[in-house]
Image (cartoon, grey):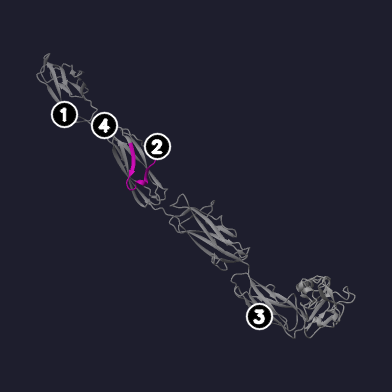
């Protein structure tokens, strides 16, 4: 304030009466500064002279706009009080110092769209500025709005991170994170408000400032694997428990292919299939990745696993699957697994074969006019089609009935009847060949003799009357060391309840070729009273006794007894009379020989 003497005499002892909270001090203007002591200006102002003072209003309490007067009194003419008081008015108020906080920018949109896979997120640091003239305290941040759950604070670990206070004129950064979004979060725009509450000055009422955040969520797509199965090279079946795959033993053309197709909207990365728990009996080729060699299966692409049965063993060979697939996709960036548990049923069948049997026993000597059967039996295979069996021979005196008979899985057996003409000449080693379309019968030929010659001999071994029945007696004849043809002919013991008859048209010879007997009709051996030659010569070891023959009553309990009170009839092998069959009765505990005759 400039004080000027507009009078025509000197002025001094200038005294200012100030309103409350006002004070004066030496001036600081461009004019001469007044000398001030308290409220008194000690300068002596001559007419038209002036000096400056500084008026200070000092109040720490907010005060509304007000007006008051400053009164000035002085002396003139060396001590005369001024006739009146000079007054000047002052306007004043006290405004509260305050923090003023604001975010910059006040609206922000995240640039990256996140997927609702509970993984993806985006981050931004928003700046907070205090443009006020006091420190802000008690800063509290929170999010509100429909999308608030997707927005959160993250600590950026930088020196400018906002805390609970902010000095006037200062700024800080607050990290805002958008995401992650769970799979249940719908795709679309998301909005949230970042609210900041703070105390603008000590004792002040809480104020708020806000910023708006926008973000976009998209649906995370998944890889979806569909399984299809193809098969090749199986004889039949579909792999179900009711209709297993049919596989022929030792064939390697059968194969099952598992096709895993990604029908989802996301590629499957880091994909691999754990097939370690596959059952034995199958060879697995895995093209769907392993733990050490993962693959990517793009949308609408596929990978395959091939299973080839090991067919070295017949019987059930089921493929028991307990596989686990692993992959990552947009919806599951941390990985997802899926199990495949399944049993594919299969049976390995022995290869089809045609086995030949016949009603010949050994290499039988067939009489002219006789017949026998050839039986073809199909074994193995699966639903085998019909195959014809054909018998052929170069011997015109042998004919066939039901030739070209057929066998199949549904009708596995057929019979060809073989006839020897009545006029057939005697011959040995006649061969009948057997053929089929694609399987060689086993055996594929039969050899037979056409002859009326049969051999009868006395055994080298001797036994009690317990021969094991007639079957035991036959076995002894078949295996006896005197038997001239154990492998190719059938031999039976000459006992009344076993081989009681000499057959018509047959001629019986000794091992040395001497004729023993021949008949035109079938005759009971016991009734033949005369032989052409003895079966054993007189000088043999048999002497005149020793051949078990038997009759209805004397048969050692049908050749099952070795008791001394049971009896059996014996014959003399060196005689040609009826005594050759009926010479004496002996206790069954004695050992005797057997007559053995070729069939």
Mark 3 or 2: the one toward you: 3
Q: Which residues are magenta?
A: 139-159
Judge from the rendering whether residue 63 lies leftward or rightward of residue 470; answer left or right. left
Q: Is there CB contact under 8 Å for labels 2 and 1?
A: no
Mark 1 to mark 4: distance in Å?
21 Å
**Residue placed under numbered mark 3 in the picture:** 403
Secondary structure under the numbered disc 4 in the rendered image: loop
Q: Is residue 407 visible?
A: yes
Q: Quadrant of the N terminus?
A: top left
Judge from the rendering whether residue 178 lies leftward or rightward of residue 338; answer left or right. left
Q: Residue furthest front?
A: 565
Q: Residue 513: where, in percent of width, then height?
A: 84, 79
**Residue placed under numbered mark 2 in the picture:** 158
Q: Is residue 50 visible?
A: no
**Residue placed under numbered mark 4 in the picture:** 97
Mark 3 or 4: the one toward you: 3
Q: Residue 298 versus residue 47: which sits nearer the camera? A: 298
Q: Is residue 32 above or below residue 525?
A: above
Secondary structure under the numbered disc 1 in the rendered image: strand
Q: Residue 243: where, in percent of width, then height?
A: 55, 67
Whichever of labels 1 and 4 marks the residue nearer the N terminus, that label is: 1
Residue 129 quadrant: top left
Mark 3 or 1: the one toward you: 3
């Amino acid at each position: 304030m400039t004080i000027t003497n507009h009078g025509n005499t000197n002025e001094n002892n200038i005294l200012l009466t100030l309103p409350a909270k006002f004070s004066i001090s030496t001036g600081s203007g461009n004019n001469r500064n007044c000398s001030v002591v308290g409220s008194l200006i000690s300068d002596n102002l001559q007419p038209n002279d002036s000096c400056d003072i500084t008026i200070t209003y000092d109040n720490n309490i907010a005060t509304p706009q007000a007006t008051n007067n400053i009164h000035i009194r002085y002396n003139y003419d060396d001590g005369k009080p001024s006739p009146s008081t000079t007054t000047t008015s002052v306007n004043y108020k006290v405004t509260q110092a305050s923090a003023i906080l604001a975010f910059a920018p006040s609206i922000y949109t995240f640039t990256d769209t996140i997927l609702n896979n509970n993984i993806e997120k985006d981050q931004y640091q928003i700046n907070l500025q205090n443009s006020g003239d006091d420190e802000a305290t008690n800063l509290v941040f929170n999010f509100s709005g429909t999308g608030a759950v997707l927005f959160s604070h993250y600590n950026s670990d930088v020196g400018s991170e906002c805390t609970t206070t902010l000095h006037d004129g200062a700024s800080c950064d607050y990290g805002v994170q958008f995401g992650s979004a769970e799979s249940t979060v719908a795709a679309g725009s998301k909005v949230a408000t970042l609210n900041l509450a703070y105390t603008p000055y000590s004792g002040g009422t809480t104020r708020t400032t806000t910023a708006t955040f926008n973000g976009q969520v998209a649906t995370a797509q998944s890889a979806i694997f569909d399984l299809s199965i193809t098969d090749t090279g199986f004889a039949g079946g579909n792999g179900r428990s009711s209709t297993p795959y049919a596989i022929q033993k030792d064939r390697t053309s059968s194969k099952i292919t598992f096709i895993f197709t990604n029908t989802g909207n996301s590629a499957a990365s880091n994909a691999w299939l754990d097939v370690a728990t596959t059952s034995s009996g199958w060879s697995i080729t895995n093209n769907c990745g392993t733990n050490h060699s993962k693959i990517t299966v793009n949308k609408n692409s596929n990978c395959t696993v091939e299973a080839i049965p090991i067919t070295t063993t017949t019987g059930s060979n089921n493929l028991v699957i307990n596989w686990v697939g692993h992959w990552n996709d947009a919806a599951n960036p941390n990985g997802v697994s899926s199990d495949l548990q399944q049993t594919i049923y299969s049976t390995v069948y022995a290869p089809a074969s045609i086995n030949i049997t016949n009603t010949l026993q050994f290499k039988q000597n067939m009489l002219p006019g006789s017949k026998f059967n050839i039986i073809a039996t199909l074994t193995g295979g699966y639903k085998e089609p019909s195959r014809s069996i054909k018998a052929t021979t170069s011997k015109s005196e042998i004919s066939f009935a039901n030739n070209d008979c057929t066998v199949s899985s549904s009708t596995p057996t057929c019979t060809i009847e073989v006839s020897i003409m009545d006029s057939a000449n005697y011959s040995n080693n006649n061969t009948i060949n057997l053929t089929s379309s694609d399987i060689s019968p086993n055996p594929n030929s039969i050899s037979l003799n056409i002859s009326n010659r049969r051999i009868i001999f006395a055994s080298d071994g001797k036994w009690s009357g317990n021969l094991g029945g007639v079957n035991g007696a036959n076995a002894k004849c078949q295996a006896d060391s005197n038997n001239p043809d154990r492998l190719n002919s059938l031999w039976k013991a000459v006992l009344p309840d076993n081989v009681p008859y000499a057959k018509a048209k047959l001629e019986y010879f000794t091992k040395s070729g001497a004729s023993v007997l021949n008949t035109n009709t079938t005759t009971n051996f016991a009734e033949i009273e005369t032989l052409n030659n003895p079966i054993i010569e007189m000088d043999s070891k048999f002497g005149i006794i020793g051949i078990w023959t038997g009759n209805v009553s004397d048969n050692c309990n049908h050749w099952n007894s070795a008791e001394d009170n049971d009896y059996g009839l014996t014959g003399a092998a060196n005689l040609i009379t009826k005594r050759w069959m009926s010479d004496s009765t002996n206790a069954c505990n004695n050992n005797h020989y057997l007559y053995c005759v070729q069939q």
